[in-house]
Image (cartoon, rainbow, N blue to C red):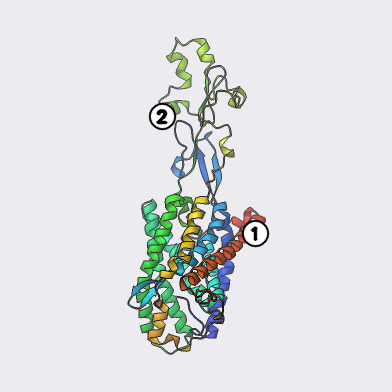
Amino acid sequence: MHVPDGFINAPVSVAAGVVAAGAVAVSLRGARRELGGATAEFTAGTADGPGRAGAADRPRRGGPPAVAAPMGGERTAPLAGLVAAFIFAVQMLNFPVAAGTSGHLLGGALAAILVGPYTGLLCVSVVLLMQGVLFADGGLTALGVNIVDMGVVTVPVAYLVFRLLLRVLPRGRGAITGASFAAALVSVPAAAVAFTGLYALGGTADVELARVFAAMTGVHVLIGIGEAAITAATVGAVVAVRPDLVYGARDFAVRPLQFRTAAVATPGGGTVRHGAEQTDEPEAEASASGKEPAGESEAAHPARSESERENTFTPGHGSAAAPASASVRPSEHRPVGASSAPASSVSAPRRPNRGLWIGGMAATVICAGVVSFYASGSPDGLEKVAADHGIDKKAEDHAAKDSPLADYGVESIADPRLSGGLAGVIGAGATLAVGSSVFVAVRRRREAAGPRAGSGREPV
């Protein structure tokens, strides 16, 4: 749906450019929070059971503290550049949707779900910029129109539909995949409607708008099915291996992290519940856990020897003056898995992104360098409607038509397979480089601004 130069007149193109620039500026600010990551509270637990999470199960007075741990800050920034490169590569794969018509991924829904709406809009903008400057795909004077149509419209529409569906669907990977399918499906006809509206305001050819509207929405509903399938397959693949990296589902796919503690042996032969939850209600706690209350132990077991009583440590009783930190040395009698640090000092473990990066880069290179050769050569939905209804009567030549990579081919290479594949890989690499540079710069600016930069409410 790349709008070429000459479809929309200059005043509307300039106005769309202003809107696009404003949206990008807002996204640069909003992306600081998305690329900086969010925080979540985790509750410590004991070796006898997991920590409690949720509003209904908050720790009681004296219980384990909540742990504030980062979620996705260092993960989202590098992923965003890869998402932009992947969208560029998959957009090269036109698929047939009707007789003589093809379609391709727009990418707004995929980017918004994976890296967030603000960062997603930046991803789409970087892709459109690379396509217009290097490959003469989408007019330079129409760059603002394309960003509005394929980014400003598709990203918020898809993200809103995705989040609303997650609120009503049962939690699980299937719900995330299904919601991404529906969000992508809706976003493509929405872009077609937006283009029709822009053309009604500033179209350069005199055409019947009702017929253009019907043709655009009809063919892009079919294209939306392909977009939905690609988006759902990609999101489903990421959710299967790293659900914590799907920004749009971060609070639906990731379970609260629970830190457990264990009983450790003391030199005297007793045990200490290291880091265990303490309570001011020993009887209730004992009845819930199946253990006898500490205050009743001596009366219930009169035959217990005095030495056994002395060697048994009960939190809050008896030998409380000898805390665990003083009576247990790190090298003595410590079971595997016992934690020596207080729960408040424990942070969420980091999982490496290497596997996802390798898989994402391999998919990007294969799509851009190999599969693109087999893409449909039929005109896409907008090109077909423009030819059938006369929208392209005043289309202009692209300013970068003489680019060595114009039309997704390397000018000096005669072999079409090699020429197209190499051009695709170059374009994906350039998109990755430019996108990653932008996202790293945004994240560093947030870090330099301090924690206040991440405050504020996030979208639905």
Tell which of 57 and 431 is nearer to you. 431
Tell which of 372 and 315 is nearer to you. 372
Asked if one can make out residue 19 in the rendered structure from this viewpoint, the answer is no
Residue span colored magenta = 375-379
In the picture as drawn, the residue positioned furthest to the front comes out as 414
Residue type indicated by callout 1: Arg
Residue type indicated by callout 2: Ala
Check disc 2 and report its element: helix, strand or loop.
helix
> Which labelled disc corresponds to residue 445?
1
Asked if one can make out residue 87 in the rendered structure from this viewpoint, the answer is yes
Q: In the picture shown, does residue 325 fall above or below 453?
A: above
CB-based contact (under 8 Å), mark 2 and mark 1 = no
> Which labelled disc corresponds to residue 288?
2
How packed is label 2: few (under 14 Cα within 10 Å), some, or many (20 or more)? few
Query: Which picture quadrant has residue 187?
Result: bottom left
**Reading the chain from its start, which is encountered first: label 2 or label 1?**
2
Residue 144 image position (x, y, % from top left)? 54, 76
> Does the magenta-highlighted stretch encompass residue 407?
no
Of the two numbered discs 2 and 1 in the rendering, the one whose residue sits closer to the viewer: 1
> Does the magenta-highlighted stretch encompass residue 377?
yes
Q: In the picture shown, does residue 256 fall above or below 46?
A: below
**Residue lying at 42% horizontally and 51% vertically, measured from the top left:** 240
From the viewer's perspective, tell me whether residue 192 is left or right of residue 310: left
Q: In the picture shown, does residue 79 fall above or below 269?
A: below
> Which labelled disc corresponds to residue 207?
none
Residue 355 image position (x, y, % from top left)? 50, 51
Give the mark count.
2
Query: Which picture quadrant has residue 436?
Result: bottom right
